[in-house]
Image (cartoon, grey):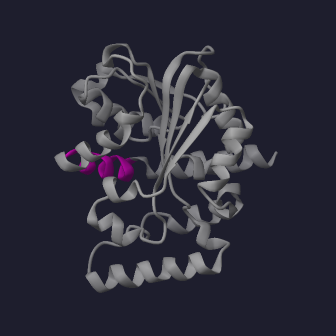
């Protein structure tokens, strides 16, 4: 019952955020160096398969940043999200590239794909937002081919709700952002609503990415590689100031 209730709240929140989040993604996609940095952070992790043959699932695509980036680079990705409004934004953001992307409305923990479908399943800022990440990691493993890889970009978002040191660091970020007179990305539309939801989500309490690595190995992934400083390569200077206390990591988990 709890899972259904919190999932409904999550879908409701992101449905309301879809339009503003779509604008944010469009701004990201305009920055050549930003796009190049993200491609450089993901492509070396892909299995050694020709671009035209590589099957990639962007799970939790939101307004489509990863899917569009991949389509621009010559791939033909699948993009899935649980909210119709996010997929609407993703199609609009993709423009003419939408024909290169297969869009699907589905949940991250119950994918409507056959076993061994994809070479890569990837996500950005999704797993912190999941009611049961282990179910999702198991499901992603199911749809990955042998030798396929789950590539997860995420951070310890909202860990400050349960850790005093993290809270102090988070507050320093707010002070530094104000001192530099730049936009505070943690002040915005319904931010307090997401904070209340995050209090109920299990990942807000976990020490990441250590927790993810241990669970992925327990779930049967053959090898798990963690890069804890990928944020240095993919974040803008504004993001680095805003999120210094919450650095983004990359996890690459390979299926045997």
Left or right of 222: which side holds 21?
left
Residue 250 against residue 101 in the figure, above or below: below
Quadrant in the picture for the C terminus: top right
- As drawn, the residue found furthest toward the right would be 1
Asked if residue 31 shows in the view, the reply is: no
Q: Position of residue 157 (x, y in %)?
A: 54, 62
Quadrant in the picture for the N terminus: top right
Q: Quadrant of residue 45?
A: top left
- Secondary structure character of the magenta stretch overall: helix
Residue 224 against residue 105 in the figure, above or below: below
Q: Quadrant of residue 91?
A: top left
Q: Position of residue 69 (x, y in %)?
A: 29, 35
Foreground: 143 or 100? 143
Question: Residue 22 magenta-drawn?
Answer: yes
Left or right of 220: which side holds 107?
left
Residue 156 against residue 182 in the figure, above or below: above
The magenta-colored residue range is 19-30
- What's the residue at 50%, 64% (across, down)? 190
Foreground: 14 or 232? 232
Left or right of 2: which side holds 90?
left
- What's the residue at 54%, 83% (across, down)? 168
How many marks the image carries: the answer is 0
Question: Residue 13 magenta-drawn?
Answer: no
Asked if residue 50 shows in the view, the reply is: yes
- What's the residue at 65%, 36% (across, down)? 137
Q: Position of residue 253 (x, y in %)?
A: 56, 36
- What's the residue at 71%, 60% (across, down)? 200
């Amino acid at each position: 019952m709890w899972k259904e209730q919190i999932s409904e709240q999550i879908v409701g929140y992101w449905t309301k955020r879809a339009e503003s989040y779509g604008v944010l993604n469009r701004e990201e996609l305009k920055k050549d160096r930003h796009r190049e940095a993200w491609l450089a952070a993901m492509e070396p992790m892909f299995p050694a398969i020709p671009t035209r043959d590589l099957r990639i699932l962007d799970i939790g695509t939101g307004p489509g940043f990863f899917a569009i980036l991949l389509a621009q680079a010559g791939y033909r990705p699948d993009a899935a999200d649980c909210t119709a409004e996010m997929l609407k934004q993703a199609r609009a953001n993709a423009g003419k590239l939408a024909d290169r992307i297969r869009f699907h409305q589905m949940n991250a923990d119950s994918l409507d794909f056959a076993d061994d479908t994809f070479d890569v399943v990837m996500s950005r800022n999704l797993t912190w937002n999941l009611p049961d990440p282990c179910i999702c990691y198991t499901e992603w493993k199911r749809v990955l081919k042998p030798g396929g890889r789950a590539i997860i970009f995420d951070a310890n978002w909202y860990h400050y709700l349960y850790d005093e040191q993290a809270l102090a660091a988070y507050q320093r970020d707010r002070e530094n952002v104000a001192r530099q007179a730049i936009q505070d990305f943690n002040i915005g539309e319904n931010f307090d609503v997401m904070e209340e939801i995050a209090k109920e989500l299990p990942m807000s309490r976990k020490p990441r990415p250590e927790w993810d690595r241990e669970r992925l190995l327990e779930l049967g992934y053959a090898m798990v590689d963690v890069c804890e400083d990928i944020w240095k390569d993919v974040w803008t200077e504004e993001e680095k100031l805003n999120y210094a206390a919450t650095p983004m990591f990359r996890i690459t988990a390979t299926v045997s």
